[in-house]
C-alpha cells in the first residue's frame, strides 16, 4: 500500500508543481507510471507549443517546446526521486504528438537517484545528457528517436513509435 500512496502523491505533486511550464502553459499528460521495487517507469506526452507563441516563426515555437520538454524531463526526474522513496532508478520516456501524426519518442533514458551533475553546468541539454537522458537536438529542436531492436535508441533514420 505504501507504493500505491506514494504513486498517488507523485501524481498530485506532478499536477501541482508542473501544471504550467516556463515556456508553455499547457499541462503534461502522464501516459504511464509503473513501480517495480526500486525501479520506476514513467512516460508522458510533452507539452505542445504555447498558444501565445502562435505569432512566432514555427522554428522558434519548436525550439521553445523542445526546451520545455527537456526542463520537464529534469523536473520529473527530481520529482520521482523526491516522492517515491524506494525508487533508485527510473526509465523515462517523453513522446510528442504533432497534429495529424502518430506519437513520436523524443527523449528517453535511465536515470539514477544518486547521479549528481556539477552545479556549474548551465546548459539544460548537457545537464539532461549527464543525468542519463538520450535525445537528438538539431538546431535546438528535438528530433524523433528511432527504437533500436536491441533495446536502445539511435538517430540513424526517423521512425514513429
Image (cartoon, grey):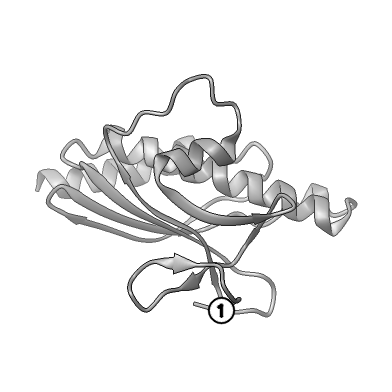
Relative height, residue 85 to residue 122 (above, below): below
Residue 31 visible in the snapshot:
yes
Q: Nearer the viewer, residue 40 or 27?
A: 40
Horizontal and vertical percent position of residue 92: 38, 54
Q: Nearer the viewer, residue 100 or 147?
A: 147
Report the side of 9 relative to 59 (left or right).
left
Report the side of 2 relative to 143 (left or right).
left
Q: Nearer the viewer, residue 86 or 113?
A: 113
Pick out the residue farthest to the left.
Answer: 1
Residue 12 in which image quadrant: top left
Relative height, residue 132 to residue 17 (above, below): below
Relative height, residue 30 to residue 38 (above, below): below
Horizontal and vertical percent position of residue 155: 55, 68
Mark 1 residue element: loop
**Residue at the spot 58% in from the left edge and 41% down from the top edge:** 125
Pick out the residue farthest to the front.
Answer: 156
Residue 19 visible in the snapshot:
no
Disc 1 designates what residue? 159
Q: Total label count?
A: 1
**Residue at the spot 75% in from the left edge and 52% down from the top edge:** 139
Horizontal and vertical percent position of residue 19: 53, 42
Rate crowding at label 1 as few (under 14), some (14 to 19) or many (20 or more) other CA atoms within 10 Å: few
Relative height, residue 156 to residue 4 (above, below): below
Horizontal and vertical percent position of residue 16: 45, 37
Report the side of 114 relative to 130 (left or right).
left
Residue 93 in which image quadrant: bottom left
Amino acid at each position: 500500500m505504501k507504493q500505491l500512496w506514494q504513486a498517488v502523491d507523485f501524481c498530485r505533486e506532478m499536477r501541482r508543481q508542473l501544471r504550467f511550464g516556463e515556456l508553455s502553459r499547457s499541462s503534461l499528460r502522464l501516459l504511464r507510471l509503473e513501480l517495480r521495487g526500486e525501479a520506476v517507469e514513467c512516460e508522458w506526452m510533452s507539452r505542445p507549443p504555447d498558444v501565445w507563441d502562435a505569432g512566432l516563426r514555427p522554428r522558434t515555437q519548436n525550439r521553445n517546446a523542445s526546451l520545455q520538454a527537456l526542463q520537464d524531463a529534469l523536473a520529473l526526474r527530481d520529482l520521482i526521486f523526491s516522492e517515491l522513496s524506494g525508487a533508485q532508478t527510473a526509465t523515462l520516456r517523453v513522446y510528442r504528438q504533432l497534429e495529424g501524426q502518430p506519437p513520436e519518442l523524443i527523449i528517453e533514458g535511465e536515470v539514477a537517484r544518486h547521479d549528481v551533475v556539477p552545479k556549474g553546468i548551465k546548459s539544460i541539454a548537457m545537464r539532461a545528457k549527464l543525468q542519463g537522458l538520450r535525445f537528438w537536438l538539431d538546431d535546438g529542436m528535438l528530433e524523433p528517436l528511432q527504437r533500436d531492436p536491441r533495446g536502445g535508441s539511435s538517430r540513424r533514420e526517423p521512425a514513429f513509435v
